[in-house]
Amino acid sequence: MASAHVFDRLSAFLDDELDPVASGEVSQHLESCPDCSAALARQRELGENLRRDLEYHRAPDLLRARVMRDLRAAGRRDAVRSRPAAQAWRWLGAAAAVIAVGGGTWIVATLPRERPDAATAREAVSGHIRSLMANHLTDVASTDQHTVKPWFSGRLDFSPPVTDFAAANYPLVGGRLDYLQGRPVAALVYMHRMHVINVFVWPMSDAHEGIAPALTQRGFHVIHGTRAGMAYWVVSDLNAEELAAFAQLLAAPSGKP
Amino acid sequence: MTHEESRETTGPEPHLSPRERERFDECVLPYLDAAYNLARYLLRDGDQAEEAVQEAFLRAIRHFGGFRGADGRAWILSIVRNTCFTQLRRRRSGGAMVEFDEEAHSLEAELSAPEADLARAIASESVHEGLGRLAAEFREALVLRELEGLSYKEIAHVMGVPIGTVMSRLARARKQLLLALGAGAKESV
Ligand SMILES: [Zn+2]
């Protein structure tokens, strides 16, 4: 077999994309042709260099937020068409567990999929998963609420309440910026035993205070509440009871419900 | 993708039913990073890559109802690369569609002679810079193969070309990159 003929196939040979016959011919030729062997070695080395040196550009958070917003918008149009607005709150009556605490009502439930807040819950779960997978749980790692709270000022146009619940075995481990609902939000990170809890917080002035849509999604529990003009979305793989207990702490951070 | 590549503002209103949204989250959304990475290497500009990827995802949402395949990654990457190449063609030729000609598109044809000499002289050029000198079609092949680890069949699906074309394009891309890095002058004939 001629060198020129083999030479053109080295790249596919390297990628293991030749059929067995052609591959056999190339192998045989390589045994007796130093030029082709050297060329193959160079190509192999090139591949190793590319995989080692080229940066893998991950999607920036803002792009992800924009795509999520487009996805939400696409879902909303459909939701608006298919469901009268008056029905949107009907699921509340079917909620499985209602916890009334202090100034708010917090609800944990497993509910049908097409609820009006499902898109936000999905986003919150995605944010939670992303924070675990991307190795980017916290921008500021601190168990001190007096460190975490000031960190957010200057980075956000609102000041999220930050409280450490270490005494109740829900220690604060840090905070980071995240994007939900197409806007920057505060993400407070807590731990309970080995479970990570993400609390997404952003201002919501026109919210029905105390009404807390919540659900279970992809194995994660999501609890939603509003208190003092802030929306709280709590996400964790922690069991519903313990997460509800945590939500109670959030709902009455002074410890005096 | 075979549908019209023109402005997407004229298409149907993008909407997904909850069931479609769930499928989209499973089959397409996980490849947002891959989409951005490809766009970044094709366009070589972060802002333009973000814009292209967002546009591609809008297009994907709009046409998701027609997606019946199993390979969401190849599907979204093909939309992303088509979006990017539409931009590149606008840059290249003021809007006229020019078919890529592998035979004519040698590195030497891209570079003026003194630059070509320079390319050989700089033996230690980084692979990143070297990759940047290649035609977008060659960069694409290398990124899909080396960074995404796609098979030739999957790359063919993304690029919308026969497997044989993938084979020759990758062979040329490697040869040209080695040339640009100063390691393959011998093989450049
Ligand atoms: Zn040979």
Image (tube, grey):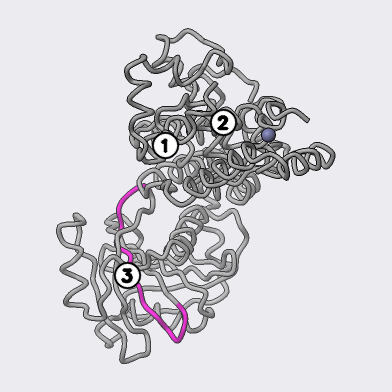
Amino acid of disc 3: Leu
Amino acid of disc 2: Ile
| Residue A15: percent from left, percent from top | 66, 43
Task: Tell me the number on the disc at residue A188.
Answer: 3
Above or below, A168 against A232 in this view is below
Q: Mark 1 falls within which chain?
A: B
**Magenta part, dominant SS:** strand
User: Is residue A75 found left or right of A142 in the rendered image?
Assistant: right
Is residue A165 visible to us here?
Answer: yes
Name the outermost residue toward the right.
A21
Please give the residue where the numbered disc 2 appears in the rendered image. B79
Q: Mark 3 falls within which chain?
A: A
Q: Earlier in the sequence, mark 2 or mark 1?
A: 1
- The residue range painted magenta reads A182-195
**Could you tell me which quadrant the C terminus of chain A lies in?**
bottom left
Task: Tell me the number on the disc at residue B40.
Answer: 1
Above or below, B106 against B177 in this view is above
Could you classify mark 3 by the number of other residues whose Cα lies within 10 Å: few (under 14), some (14-19), or many (20 or more)? Answer: many
